[in-house]
Structure formats: structure tokens, C-alpha cells
């Protein structure tokens, strides 16, 4: 590929039927950057400079941790007490990690914590309006993941096979 040529490799990809895509613009099995833009639209994030974070990094750091998405998904169904939330999260989150996770989500305005003055105190968690707005994005990500699971598995298998072949040389 020559300097200045941007392409995304996709196994068996064809640019046929992509409006504005020139079939000769990219080698066989690749989709040109212009064709990709036509297929998927504008980039999700277009910062002015590579160093500019566009205010996204801290949010992605929060949602990209191991437990936050699980907590948001479980709270999407309604108000939960701490122990019930802990029981519902698959993978066995520890009390300490759940405490840290809900505190961070509360700090970010995604979760509301309510303490009822009983003995012992009852603590309930629920999503805020902003937290509920996030559930639509998580569902889209889950739907995408399910739809692309076979293709991802095939890509991993092809990659691992190529790595094994290269290692045996």
C-alpha cells in the first residue's frame, strides 16, 4: 500500500454496491477509507488534535472498567439494595469492589444512592435519568456484539492460525 493510502482490511470484503466507492481504489479484500466512510458515516470522535481527548477519556475509563456496565445493566430494572445488586452481578463481585463501583457511578451522576434511617441502615441504588440514557447505548453495544459474534470468532481463528503458521516457520 502506498504512502497516503488508507484502507481497512476486511476478509472477503467487496466494494460492489457501495455508492461512491471506486472498485480499483483499494487492493482486493480491502475497503478504501472513502468507501468505509460511506458505509459507516462520520467517525464517532473527531478531536482537533491527537492529544485532545474531547472529554471522553474519563467517561470511557469509568465505563470500560470490569464492573460498571454490569451495575448499570442490573440497575436498569429498578431500585436494588446493595446485597441484591451484589447477588445479581455475574462473576462474583466483592463487597469492596461493588462499593467502589457504585461510588464512582454516583460521583459521575449515573447512580443515585438512598440511605434509609433504619437499624441497620438500608441502602438502595437506582439509575439517574442520565444513567437510564446510558442503557440504550449499552443495549446497542450488546446487540452489535451478538450480531458479530460469529464474525469475531472467525477472525480470531484466522488470526490465531496465521500466528501459529508464522511461528512454525
Image: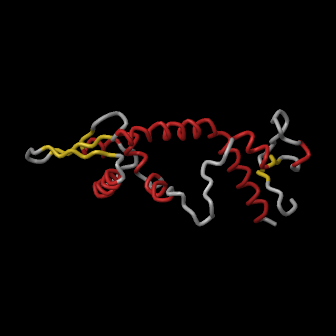
Q: Position of residue 123 (x, y in %)?
A: 20, 45
Q: Position of residue 22 (x, y in %)?
A: 88, 42
Q: Nearer the viewer, residue 165 or 60?
A: 60
Please indicate whether residue 15 sits to the left or right of residue 89 in the image. right
> Relative to residue 124, is residue 103 depicted above or below?
below
Q: Quadrant of the N terminus?
A: bottom right
Image point (43%, 55%), residue name: 62
For residue 163, which quarter of the picture? bottom right
Q: Residue furthest left?
A: 119
- Locate residue 138 relative to residue 123 in the image: left or right: right
Residue 53 placement (x, y as % from top left): 54, 61
Q: Which residue is located at x 46 percent, y 54 percent?
A: 59
Quadrant of res 99: bottom left
Instruction: Tell which residue pokes out farthest to the front in this image.
Output: 48
* Scheme of image coloration: secondary structure
Q: Residue at x 44, y 41 (%)?
A: 134
User: Which of these two is toward me, 157 or 77?
Assistant: 77
Q: Up-down: is 56 above or below 15?
A: below
In the picture, which quadrant includes the C terminus?
A: bottom right
State the count of labels.
0
The picture places residue 166, in percent across and down from the top left corner, at 78, 63
Amino acid at each position: 500500500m502506498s504512502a497516503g493510502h488508507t484502507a481497512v482490511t476486511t476478509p472477503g470484503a467487496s466494494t460492489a454496491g457501495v455508492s461512491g466507492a471506486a472498485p480499483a481504489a483499494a487492493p482486493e479484500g480491502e475497503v478504501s477509507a472513502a468507501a468505509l466512510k460511506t458505509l459507516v458515516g462520520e467517525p464517532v470522535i473527531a478531536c482537533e488534535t491527537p492529544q485532545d481527548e474531547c472529554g471522553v477519556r474519563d467517561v470511557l475509563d469509568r465505563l470500560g472498567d470490569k464492573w460498571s456496565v454490569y451495575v448499570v445493566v442490573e440497575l436498569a430494572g429498578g431500585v436494588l439494595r446493595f446485597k441484591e445488586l451484589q447477588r445479581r452481578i455475574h462473576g462474583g463481585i466483592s463487597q469492596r469492589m461493588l462499593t467502589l463501583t457504585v461510588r464512582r457511578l454516583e460521583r459521575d451522576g449515573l447512580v443515585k444512592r438512598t440511605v434509609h434511617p433504619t437499624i441497620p441502615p438500608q441502602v438502595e441504588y437506582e439509575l439517574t435519568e442520565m444513567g437510564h440514557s446510558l442503557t440504550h447505548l449499552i443495549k446497542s453495544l450488546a446487540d452489535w456484539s451478538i450480531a458479530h459474534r460469529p464474525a469475531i470468532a472467525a477472525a480470531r481463528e484466522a488470526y490465531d492460525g496465521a500466528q501459529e503458521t508464522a511461528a512454525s516457520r
